[in-house]
Image: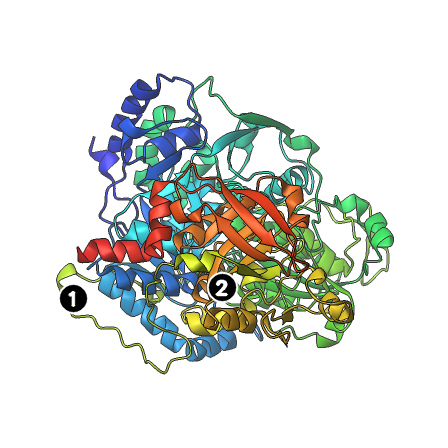
Amino acid sequence: TPLLQTPLSLYDQTPLPYERQLAKLAQVRAKLGRQDLTLAEKVLFTHVADVEALSTAPGTYLQLFPDRVAMQDATAQMAVLQFINSGLPQTAVPATVHCDHLIDAKCGAQPDMEAAKRTNAEVYDFLSTAARKYGMGFWGPGSGIIHQIVLENYAFPGGMIIGTDSHTPNAGGLGMIAVGVGGADAVDVLAGFEWELPLPKICGVHLTGRLQGWASPKDLILHLAKLLTVKGGTGYVLEYYGEGVETLSATGMATICNMGAEVGATCSLFPYTASMRRYLAATGRSSIAAAADQVADQLLRADANAHYAKVIELDLATVPAYLNGPHSPDRGNAVATMKAACAANNWPTKLSVGLIGSCTNSSYEDLTRAVSVIRQARAHGITQAKAHFYISPGSERIRATIERDGLLREFTEFGGVVLANACGPCIGQWKRQDVEEMKQLNCIVTSFNRNFEKRNDGCPNTLAFVASPEMVTAMAIAGQVTFDPTTDTLEDAHTHAPFQLACPQGQELPATFELGDTSLYQGPIPTAERAAVQFNINPASARLQLLVPFQPYPQEAYREALVLIKAQGKCTTDHISPAGPWLTYRGHLNNIAQNMLSAAKGVDVQVGATQNALTKTKVNLLKNHLTGQFQEVWQVAKAYQEAHRGWVVVGDENYGEGSSREHAALEPRLLGCVAVVVRSFARIHEGNLKKQGVLPLTFANPADYDRLQADDKVTLRGVEHLTPETQIVLVCTHANGTVDEIPVRHTLNATQIAWINAGSALTLIAAEQAA
Ligand code: F3S
């Protein structure tokens, strides 16, 4: 029907894919003989390139055609630079670029925005030019955070989006398969190639009951993070179902899906609900809701007897309010246990800063719940929070709406500082003003999603916790991370009588949304005008640099390779390619490569006894095994490269967890890394290494991590004739001359081996374009 041909969004002409999906679903059922499909399977399988080739055997890769691509400015630079090298005239699918990561939070929205526009003018100009040239939508600085804008404008039930940011799964709150990828994957889809995804297992999360008291959707996912840990969701799509789902708002479901990234899940999604219909209507997309209504039973909900690989049962009424951290989002502390936890761990109880908002928690419902807490305090004469208090609206639409409705004024009258509609402190773009606090162990609480060490303010003394915005607000008012609003009291400013905060009350949606400054969006220009658009990259630029495709490694690089670093414990993409000040160089590979592995903790056995003290206490200081000198990690890597020696990185569990940052793979590749050998990988990073032509290997026996020494020379036997079945063996010659043979595994399929053999996936695409 015409309704099913409604455009994908208010900004697109491309129709919703529902008719095509319904036809494919019938083919999928016939091919697989299944009437017990999960919702995730329905959405995934109706996006496969070739139903006839579809297999659900373990270890299979799906070849998919997503509906759209979204890129944030920090990752878009490298993705666009790669797309330029593909030689194509325009993107094959609708795509958007979002300027959100490069805005430093310092004084407040207006001065910070002005500073960001000056500082990043070159990058914004490059991205806006690229958007015009290749037919993409461009959301300029101040328009908001990628995931919030995607939810407000582009997400739709049953769709598929990939995004160059690890919290892309946020769009699962509107029933979308939404996956965070590296820039190289985005380039494939922009270029019209299939996107390859290892067939995920589907974990059902069966929700019953209703959240109670202070518990919010954020607490549900903090609870699951505690249960599953940061890697418990690896290889899974988390699919929520059950009557509890109907009690959640669409934005609450988005929060839950957003933080599925914190348990390593490929993505998370919810079936189509009445709250999704309400959200679509409130954001001007009633026609999409009407189309979704038509296909909901067939396409947007699981089959009645859907088969899940495993099921987690969760009664929402049992979920307490949480404060997870520090240093890991799965370190779950029920708020009620924080007094004991602080005492046991010697954490300070004082809260220095509370921050709310971000892509995770800046919905109208979130902010009205936070304000409801502030109103109670003000009713008792409390004029401002004891802790510093910041608010990061997720989008211009949200900011303008809460301004119109008076919430913004209530935040500021209470001493809150409203920051730009951007990531800011969530990604380390934060010039914290309370520098005295930072000199000692100090606590901050955010409503963001990540809390790795130094992520927010770059300070090793900061203990960061994550919680719901209303809990952050309550703790900021009390000035204590141990404050439990269900048992503790505040003091009335006039009577000095104790009083207790009542449970927060929010409003799911405003009567209407304000759009605010619509000039922050630049739509695609007509096709005929695109060819004339020119790039102007200054060869002397420190921030942007055209890429040179990687060439394949000679076989000698895999012989007697040196171990650059044997990383110990957690080694996230933030350790491999830190953010903060380095965000400046995201579009300049040679410059940003100087941060490579600079935050990784190396095992100290690589150096002699006298130097152990050095490496125990410092990062980014390594012994160059060719000269015996101590240098920064990238300098050692460069020295090996200049000496024509291949080198490897050795890592621990879940290596590369965190973000989709492909710089964490590009930098080692640029400086000559031939392989990364670990106990286990985070999925996105493993894929990124393959794309850039670096071999990702895992120890067949994880205990062999201890046998491989940091001063070994490693020959990778089997790489010379690599096939998907090849058993690679690391022949390790130890410093004392003894030799160990260590079997390792790889997950490369034939296509990925072609990338390795060509030098990188991009090198292969460019060669195919030229042919
Ligand atoms: Fe930005 Fe933090 Fe979200 S960096 S995209 S607000 S996770």
The foreground one among 61 and 256 is 61
Can residue 401 be seen? no
**Residue drawn 42% across the image and 23% down it:** 37
Q: Name the side, left or right, on which 364 lies relative to 454.
A: left
What is the crowding at mark 1: few (fewer than 14 residues within 10 Å), some, or many (at least 20)?
A: few
Q: In this rendering, which labeled residue sits more in front, label 2 or label 1?
A: 1
Q: Which mark is residue 628?
A: none
- Establish whether ligand 1 lies closer than 8 Å to the Cβ of label 2: yes
Q: How is the protein colored in the picture?
A: rainbow
Spot occupied by residue 268 in the image (x, y as percentages of width and height): 49, 39
**For the N terminus, which image quadrant?**
top left
Asked which secondary structure carries label 2, the reply is loop
Which amino acid lies under the numbered mark 1 shown in the image of this protein?
Answer: Ala
Say if 606 sits above or below 636 in the image: above
For disc 2, the marked residue is 422
Q: Which mark is residue 531?
A: 1
Q: Name the side, left or right, on which 151 lies relative to 611.
A: left
The foreground one among 424 and 234 is 234
Spot occupied by residue 632 in the image (x, y as percentages of width and height): 60, 73
Say if 627 sits above or below 401 in the image: below
